[in-house]
Amino acid sequence: MLGQFASAVLYIACALATPVIWDGRAPLNLTDTDLDSSTGPFLTVVKGSEPASHYSQLLGDTIAPTALWGDIAEQAISVSIDNSSVFIPGGGGPQNGFRRTDIIAAVNGQHDVLITQMETGTTVFHFSVKQDASRPLNYSHEYQIVFIEPNDGSHIFELQLGSPFTNPTGSLPVPNAHSFKVLDHALNVLFSTPFTADVWHNFAVEVDWNARTLAVFYSQDAATLQPVTATVQNPTAASGAAGQGDFHFTVLKLPIVNPADSPANQNDVVHFGIQEGTTEALLYSGMFVESAAAGISTGSSTAQ
């Protein structure tokens, strides 16, 4: 795999790459109060009616974070949804079709300047995901779990789990529902791998904002990241400010079509559809964004 794709990027496994632009590896002194007030690296306003710490739990020393960045002191974070996880955006009605809890990259609640810093030149978005065995997902649904979202609601790239929403609904769950899918802006699958239990799944997505290209890296637990795609074009993404947006890691659960809804409402996934209201969660660790000017950090002490 490495031999196939290494020529696509400058690949650095053992040396310091480039400085981190945003660091979401939750420090050990981050508290529930910080989550509730969006103090620190996370903006936590996209959620249901309860405080942010009801949906997102800092795990301290109860669950070890990914070992990929073992020299970085961090705590993993659980992101969960329940039947109260209905977001009401400013100036809009409740998103009754979704159940969602989003954590957005920010600095003490501010994210506009950070977007420009993270999304200029060539940058790399790192994140690690693990199953929460006590609060499993329902793989008959589609889950959009990591993405960059411009104002038009599209995603520059997306990490997806579950069964993609369709109308009419087909046989559920789909055969690859238990696999991660890394999608480009046009929803083409760039990379897929099973979401196996009891391991951290480490990802990095390199975005060249000028050339509009993507490249994907992957590993498990402490294994260094390896390139799993070539550098590929992402031509349907807008260029410039129109193609920039917030960096989300989340549990965003789409509905299943409700046959009792009108034909028009059956396609309105934001506001209509079937949700069971169960409590479900994912674990996150190792979130940060770096410049790729001098290469890509792949593990151990290569990103500080």
Image (spheres, grey):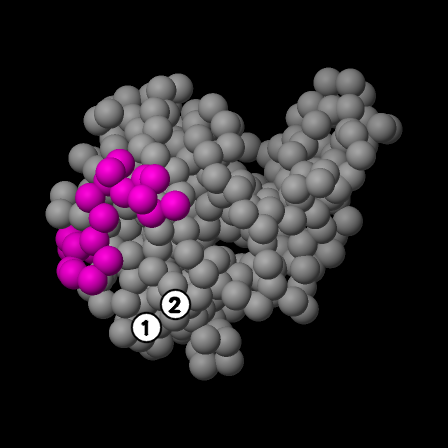
The crowd level at tag 2 (other Cα within 10 Å; few <14, some 14-19, many 20+) is: some
- Front residue of 246/291: it is 291
Span shown in magenta: 1-22
At a point 15% along the width and 53% down the height, the residue shown is: 18
Direction from residue 84 to residue 282 in the image, left or right = left
At a point 71% along the width and 51% down the height, the residue shown is: 138
Q: Which quarter of the image is occupied by the C terminus?
A: bottom left
**x and y percent of residue 196 in the render?**
59, 59
Could you say whether the residue bearing mark 2 is in a helix, strand or loop?
A: loop
**x and y percent of residue 29 in the render?**
34, 77
Toward the left, the furthest residue is 294
Q: Check whether the beta carbons of the residues at disc 2 and disc 1 lie within 8 A of each other.
A: yes
Q: Against 223, is 4 above or below?
A: above
The residues bearing labels 2 and 1 have C-alpha atoms spaced at a distance of: 8 Å
**x and y percent of residue 73 in the render?**
31, 75
Instruction: Provide the residue designation for mark 2.
Output: 222
Q: Amino acid at mark 2?
A: Ala
